[in-house]
Amino acid sequence: MAKVKSHRIKSRDNILDYILLVVFIFLIIITIYPFLNVLAISFNDPIDTMRNINFVIPRKFTWSNYVYVFKENNLMKAFVLSVARTVAGAGIGVICTAMIAYVLSRKDFYFNKVFTVLFVITMYVSGGLIPEYLLLMRTLKMGNNFLVYIIPGLVWVYNIILVRSFIEGLPLALQEAARVDGANDFTIWARIVLPLCKPVLATVGLFMAVGQWNSFMDTYLYAKELPTLQYVLYEIMEKATVKIDPHAAEQIKNAVSPLSVRMGVTIVATVPILIVYPFLQKYFVGGMTVGAVKD
């Protein structure tokens, strides 16, 4: 009787395992398929793509879509500018975020709760686009200035709360021991807190880097003379049209479709930021505390 009961339990477990396997395979397919479809269309012949877009392997391989994208004269300059704003914006932003989070995590900071409440309020109530535009363009005179890409995105409240929560979870005895040895607040922040915050700072840095890399509205509003990669790619998509003379065979051969160009632009814009992720991945699963205090 016991053997029969045990066999039934194993059968149920096996059925559940098969169900979970099918569900996971389905989730993997619906997750990967859109990216593979975009990649396939970007390498497929534009005329052939117009017939059917549901495929994951290029039916008629071609480089024409990428040739159309990369023939833009300003593309390389825009790429360098995008890399510069991403590195500078994310790097300076992480430092500013870590500084503010450290101050707010200090229990001896008298205005701790007041500033925390004010920061949180800005997450729900915003002045909107017009005050920001007037501040940057009229008051600060930052039109067509590289700093217009950096300063507005230096501090994100959500990131401050994230880093603050992480710092509050660190052993307080480490900071107290450093203070006994004569270290000031800046030394404690730079030599003790920052090294222990690598996992959360890597996460925040990736958030900021993705935000800086993908942004193009600030270029459209404030700095059209300093076009970033996203803005140039946006203009390429806007210019991509299909005007084909059915009697012109050479024109049909070299034609590009807006859909194919759009997919090529998507790959060009996505791949660089994807390359950065593996270098930061280890920090996401790293230990929460590098050091420890032994009793």
Image (tube, rainbow, N blue to C red):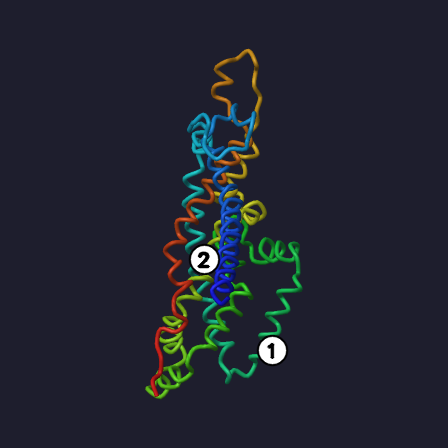
Please identify the quarter of the rendering in which residue 156 is found. bottom right
Q: Residue flagged by tag 1: what amino acid is it?
A: Val
| Residue at mark 1 to residue at mark 2: CA–CA distance | 29 Å
In the image, is residue 74 above or below residue 184?
A: above
Q: In terms of sequence position, does the residue under pointer 1 or pointer 2 come before the other?
A: 1
User: Which residue, as the protein is rendered here, is positioned at the far front?
Assistant: 1
What crowding class fits label 1: few (fewer than 14 Cα within 10 Å), some (14-19), or many (20 or more)?
few
Direction from residue 126 to residue 94 in the image, left or right: left
Q: Tell me the element at label 2.
A: helix
The residue singled out by tag 2 in the image is: 206
All told, the count of numbered labels is 2
Q: Position of residue 251 (x, y in %)?
A: 50, 17
Which residue is at a point 39% across and 82% down the rendered structure image? 175
What crowding class fits label 2: few (fewer than 14 Cα within 10 Å), some (14-19), or many (20 or more)?
many
Q: Position of residue 186 (x, y in %)?
A: 39, 76
In the image, is residue 269 above or below residue 204?
A: above
Task: Tell me whether the residue at label 1 lies in contact with that at label 2, contact meaning CB atoms closer than 8 angstroms.
Answer: no
Residue nearest the observer in this picture, 64 or 119: 64
Direction from residue 31 to residue 181 in the image, left or right: left
Which residue is at a point 42% across and 41% down the rendered structure image? 77
Q: Position of residue 194 (x, y in %)?
A: 39, 71
Q: Quadrant of the C terminus?
A: bottom left
| Between marks 1 and 2 in the image, the one whose residue lies nearer the viewer | 2
Q: Tell me the element at label 1.
A: helix
Residue nearest the observer in this picture, 74 or 163: 163
Which residue is at a point 49% across and 48% down the rendered structure image? 25
Q: Residue flagged by tag 2: what amino acid is it?
A: Leu
Q: Say which mark, if any, is on residue 114.
A: 1
Please identify the quarter of the rendering in which residue 157 is found. bottom right
Which residue is at a point 43% across and 49% down the rendered structure image? 273
Direction from residue 88 to residue 231 in the image, left or right: right
